[in-house]
Image (tube, helix red, strand yellow):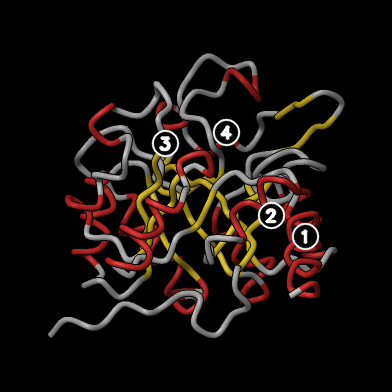
Amino acid sequence: MKTEPPIFFKDLERPFVFGHRGYNARALENTIGSFDLCRTHGIRGIELDVHMCKSGEIVVIHDHNLFRLAKTDATVEQLPWDTLKDLTLRRDDEEGRIPLLEQVFSRYGNSFYYDIELKLNSVAPTGIIEKTLDLIDRYDLADHVMISSFNPFILRAWNRKTDNAFSSGIIYSRSDDVPWILHNGQGRFIANPTYMKPHHSLIDRNLMGRLHDRNKFPIVAWTVNTKDECERLLEFDIDGFISDDPLEVIHTVRASKGRG
């Protein structure tokens, strides 16, 4: 018997704010240092990206190819954890290491709410679903996790595997990296998600009317990094923000509520 998916924002302050890849504006993305900074500043949500590497571990990193951050021209899926764990990630004068999802869960437990983006280029899952789910179960974090992806096929497979027990979201934009047929969130017809994650530039009154009000999808906007953009979106009763500078967004949200 199918269970009703949880309403992720039901018991949390709305709009809820996630740090994009941790505290990306102040620390190297998707590293323990970036997540630690969120915890230090009392930011309750983190968005992070996961891949399954060649040896089967679930690792936390955004790019498929490692060249941007590690100057290694290989994909995460081509290398085993024994190699990945020794790579040094660099951005400007910052350095860090790729963490395992298990290390993140072990360090922070239920002190965070997690938006986990599944990264997979193919339409067929290769074990990433089962292994990610196993870690969530092992650390008893089902009530603190929602799952999202640009890939509607992997998200559909997740929802079928879990019998729709998790909140799940389709991410989309009109970037050249996204197939044109998915530019307006059409992946929802494949994945059957419970919330939508459009790029903030796509959100207007028409979209909110169609998806949020008529179809009852919670809307989580990414990546909202300026006070002006945050204030514009607050007019639309947005449900969540993903931001490189989550503390700035939290301050803007609270100031707006104070004025109200």
On residue 84, the disc is 4
The relative height of residue 191 versus residue 119 in the rendered view (above or below) is below
Residue visible at 64% across and 70% down? Answer: 112
In primary-sequence order, the first of circles 3 and 4 is 4
In primary-sequence order, the first of circles 2 and 1 is 2
- In space, the residues marked 2 and 1 are separated at their CA atoms by 7 Å
Q: Residues within 10 Å of mark 3 (few under 14, many from 20)?
A: many
Q: Residues within 10 Å of mark 2 (few under 14, many from 20)?
A: some
Q: Say left or right for 98 vs 63.
A: right
Q: Nearer the viewer, mark 3 or mark 2?
A: 2
In primary-sequence order, the first of circles 1 and 4 is 4
Task: Please tell me in which quadrant of the rendered image residue 142 appears.
Answer: bottom left
Cβ atoms at labels 2 and 1 below 8 Å apart: yes
Secondary element under disc 4, as helix, strand or loop, is helix
In primary-sequence order, the first of circles 2 and 4 is 4
Q: Amino acid at mark 4?
A: Leu
